Amino acid sequence: MNDLTPIKTTAKDWATDQEVRWCPGCGDYAVLKAVQRTMPELGVRPENVVFVSGIGCSSRFPYYMETYGFHTIHGRAPTFATGIKLANPELDVWIITGDGDALSIGGNHTMHILRRNLDCQILLFNNEIYGLTKGQYSPTSRVGTRSPSTPFGSVDRPVSPCAFALGSGARFVARAIDVNKYLPDVLKAAHRHKGASFVEIFQNCIVYNDDVFAPFTAKEHAGKQLWLEAGKPMLFAGGERGLTLDREALRLSVVDVEGGDWHGANVLLHDPSNKSVAHMLVEMPFGPFPMALGVLYEDPAPTFESAVVRQNREASAGKKADLQKLVGKGQSWEVTKEPHVI
């Protein structure tokens, strides 16, 4: 059994002696620091934590965390994570992935870990480009994206990671920004949730897709961010604007809030358990609407590994292990005579 007693650590206790190797200015540095600063606040033990990654720039992450780690194969981090969690359900498992790794070759695996609700944290770094392989367009790249693989502009309709997660049955869906001060709060919320926690992190690729998120991440555009908090009104632009529900059309609308009277403006209160509103929040077109950030949806359900453990316990109750009996069960036969050799 693992010792789950909370302990005190510092950010340095979670950093390895490996040289961090990303392009200068990459948003991955900010996410790494945010995670290393957050881990001490969780009170967890490094020897009980496992970081699992696939292939991509973000997938170097396990090298830089002073924990157990697996740098696996393209798109298959959820598969390895599932095996790890089933082998030892008490381990604290984190999956580090990117938009290409999780939503292209790994789309099938991402879908199944979400619908199964394995207890883990999934951090998807979304930079809307394939950075490791030199800037090809990815599943999240916008229409018109010019890249080595789409020199005339991509004609693909991009996938929305959070819409994908909701459609796959995720019970916790959140968004954050690599350099934003609220990222640690989102990470802590994801860790508190028992089940598969899906966090999309807008991460800037300074080389191949620089400032693609600037329209809402730049300091001068901070008013276009809607940071959600359970039970609090959906306000943005310094509280001067908010979201309301057009109940006839069943869609969200932006309203002006005068004198701080959000109640009079019928601004919605955020209910993370409302999946219908969560779908609306992740599918709002940016521009007319703000970018919804924070915990968009949370509705806990029994976890996959707990069901497997319970099933195994019930199946073995009152039974004695007999390997020979197991081997001889079913379609098997026994050779009783010496074979005839020609």
Image: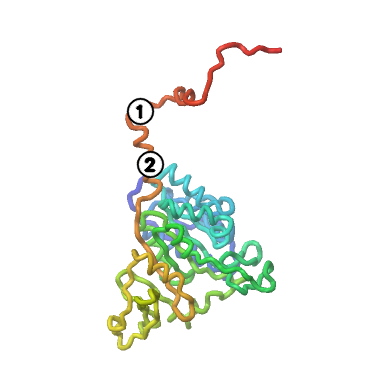
- The amino acid pointed to by label 1 is Lys
Upstream in sequence: badge 2 or badge 1: 2
Q: Secondary structure at mark 1?
A: loop
Disc 2 versus disc 1: distance between alpha carbons? 16 Å
On the question of residue 53 being in view, the answer is: yes
**Where residue 259 sits in the image (x, y, percent)?**
30, 88
**Residue at x 50% of width, y 57% of height:** 96
Where's residue 40, x and y in %? 39, 59
Three-letter code for the amino acid on which mark 2 is drawn = Val
Circle 1 residue: 319
Q: Nearer the viewer, residue 8 or 135?
A: 135
| Residue at the spot of label 2 | 309
Task: State the image coordinates of residue 30 (x, y, percent, origin top left).
Answer: 50, 67
Local SS, label 2: helix
Q: Residue 156 is drawn in which quadrant?
A: bottom right
Task: State the residue lying farthest toward the right.
Answer: 342
Residue furthest bottom as drawn: 259
Q: Quadrant of the C terminus?
A: top right
In this orientation, which residue lies closer to the viewer: 323 or 108?
108
